[in-house]
Image: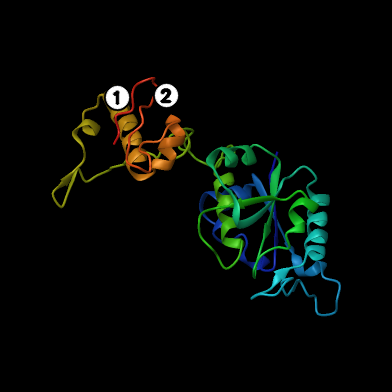
Amino acid sequence: MTFAATILTLYPDMFPGPLGHSLAGRALALGVWSLDTVQIRDFATDKHRTVDDTPAGGGAGMVLRVDVLARAIDHARAMQPDAPVLAMTPRGRPLTQARVRALAAGPGITVLCGRFEGFDERIFAGRDVEEVAVGDIVLSGGECAALMVLDACIRLLPGVMGAALSGHEESFEHGLLEYPHYTRPSEWEGRTIPEVLRSGDHAKIAAWRKAMARDQTRLRRPDLWERHTGVRVQSASGAQREATDENNEPDSAA
């Protein structure tokens, strides 16, 4: 079954963009996934095709009109009744790899790309729209964020990635960051590949990779480590809590 993506945007020419190349581009050409863009402006009813208006209560910028958005979403839902509608907004719930996997397992997604100051608040409840954020950042519009969501989903579709394990051991798949990678040359500017990776001992290599993934996550992303172990590494006051990780071993991290 083809994974169908529908993008509601004021700038349809931005798609497929980078998704027309490499693995995603080949998958698109092969029909593994499909892409439709919908011009939001087509659902304006006045002669100027107006899609925005000034904020109620005053303030800077413009806000996308709820009536125009609703007509665009209704059109997209008629095309894909079972696809969830996502709105890309920094106030949305952070996108996770688990959510990406769930989306990729479905029939497809409809993505609503905002511009200006954002959406009229009534659209979210009025059309059952899921608010999604790709980071604690503000972009000029939702199109770049939509490309990120699509890329994350498409690479998980059957047959897109060459090696079956390519996506299995990557960052976030098991709640941890990925372990470091190395390749030839074995020595570069005095820096060498860790000896264990040249040992040929697959059990030792697997143990090293697991330990490095845990260490990298604990040091670089304590928020992920906290979710992974179910405890905080260190409280705001600096007092460390006793913890138990997935192996039922005390957490000794500082």
In which quadrant of the rendered image does the N terminus lie? top right
- Residue 141's image quarter? bottom right
| Residue closest to the eye, 95 or 166 | 95
- Residue at image coords 76%, 71%: 51
Of badges 1 and 2, the one in the foreground is: 2
Residue 152 placement, left or right of 33: left
Residue 111 placement, left or right of 94: right
For marks 1 and 2 on the same chain, the one whose residue lies earlier in the sequence:
1
Report crowding for label 2: few under 14, some 14 to 19, many 20 or more residues within 10 A (C-alpha).
Answer: few
Label 1 SS: helix
Residue at far left of view: 190
In the image, residue 9 lies at what x, y percent? 69, 64
Q: Is residue 175 visible?
A: no
Residue 57 placement, left or right of 168: right
* Picture disc at residue 202: 1
- Residue at image coords 60%, 55%: 91
Question: Circle 2 is placed at which residue position?
Answer: 246
In the image, residue 201 lies at what x, y percent? 25, 24
2, above or below 148, in the image: above
Residue 152 placement, left or right of 110: left
- Residue at image coords 27%, 43%: 183
Residue at far top of view: 248
Kind of residue sitting beneath label 2: Glu
Kind of residue sitting beneath label 1: His
Report crowding for label 1: few under 14, some 14 to 19, many 20 or more residues within 10 A (C-alpha).
Answer: few
In the image, residue 235 lies at what x, y percent? 38, 39
